[in-house]
Image (cartoon, grey):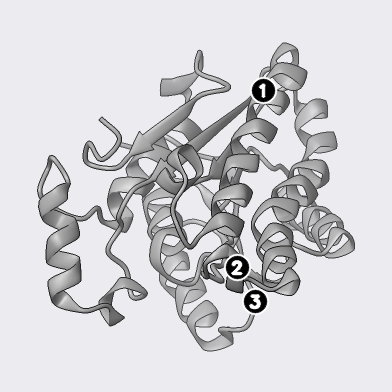
Amino acid sequence: MNLLQGKTAIITGATRGIGKGIAEVFAKNGANIAFTYSSSVEAAEKLEKELNTLGIKAKGYQSNAANYEQAQELAQDVLKTFGSIDILVNNAGITKDNLLMRMSEEDFDKVIEVNLKSVFNMTKAVQKTMLKQRKGSIINMSSVVGVKGNAGQANYAASKSGIIGFSKSVALELGSRNIRSNVVAPGFIETEMTEKLDEKVVEGWRNAIPLKRGGTPEDIANTCLFLASDLSAYITGQVLNVDGGMLT
């Protein structure tokens, strides 16, 4: 199935975990991939090579989505190189967890900047192109935490909740031009980051999930594939919880 044949996707933060999973699934479905990374040059080069072997065009960009100018520059470069921007996946994100009483102002500001402002920056950067094309799909990565909150993650939850409000507003503003804006809210996804956690803790989390397992990057990528493709042509302004039933 080549659901994204001939389309170009920008994916932020794609060298590992969920972002990498999305890049691979999109490429297998015929999309050309422009992806960003912050510091992992080696991983980026490896991913670029791997994606290019799938018969599509892929290019990695060292770019900070939290920086307005860099986001603008990136969109211009991608348009020049690929000729169109059909899909944007805002996936770049960080955590700086702490209880509110111990959370520094800097830790709050940084998480909002990287997780939320980056979504504004990148959406602004691709908007003009998508308006000209009169089509586009914007997919923003929130979290189960953005939907229900979580102790020790006030900054992260605020940023991920903010993404939901932003995405719904964009859906209302750009719908008449056939530009769709949706949110994916992953639950407990097992990636390189979760491998460092205590196995007993992880087991406890798995048992609390109705489907009795953590999600995989591919579970999220397949949901994004649906939202990026014409299969979801009549879906906009929605939040898809991909969490094995956690929020049920």
Q: Amino acid at mark 2?
A: Met
Outermost residue on the bottom side: it is: 42
| Mark 3 vs mark 2: in front | 2
Q: Secondary structure at mark 2?
A: helix
The percent coordinates of residue 73 (x first, y second) are 85, 61
The percent coordinates of residue 203 (x first, y second) are 12, 65
| Location of mark 2 (residue) | 101
Check residue 19 in the rendering and tell me which mark sits there, or answer none.
none
| Location of mark 1 (residue) | 171
> Which quadrant, please, contains the C terminus?
top left
Task: Give the Cα separation between the discs numbered 3 and 2.
Answer: 30 Å
Q: Residues within 10 Å of mark 2 (few under 14, many from 20)?
A: few
Tell me which corner region of the image, top left, top right, bottom left or bottom right, holds residue 36: bottom right
> Closer to the N terminus: mark 1 or mark 3?
3
Relative height, residue 180 to residue 63 (above, below): above
Q: Amino acid at mark 1?
A: Ala
Outermost residue on the front side: it is: 101
Q: Secondary structure at mark 3?
A: loop
Q: Amino acid at mark 3?
A: Ser
Tally of numbered discs = 3
Q: Is residue 194 left or right of residue 146?
A: left
Outermost residue on the right side: it is: 69
Relative height, residue 2 to residue 51 (above, below): above
Task: Give the Cα separation between the discs numbered 1 and 2.
Answer: 36 Å
Residue displayed at 39% across by 58% down: 24
The percent coordinates of residue 212 (x first, y second) are 10, 49
Q: Secondary structure at mark 1?
A: helix
Q: Nearer the viewer, residue 233 or 171?
A: 171
The percent coordinates of residue 120 (x first, y second) are 76, 45
Circles 3 and 2: CB atoms closer than 8 Å? no
Check residue 38 in the rendering and tell me which mark sits there, or answer none.
3
Residue displayed at 53% across by 78% down: 44
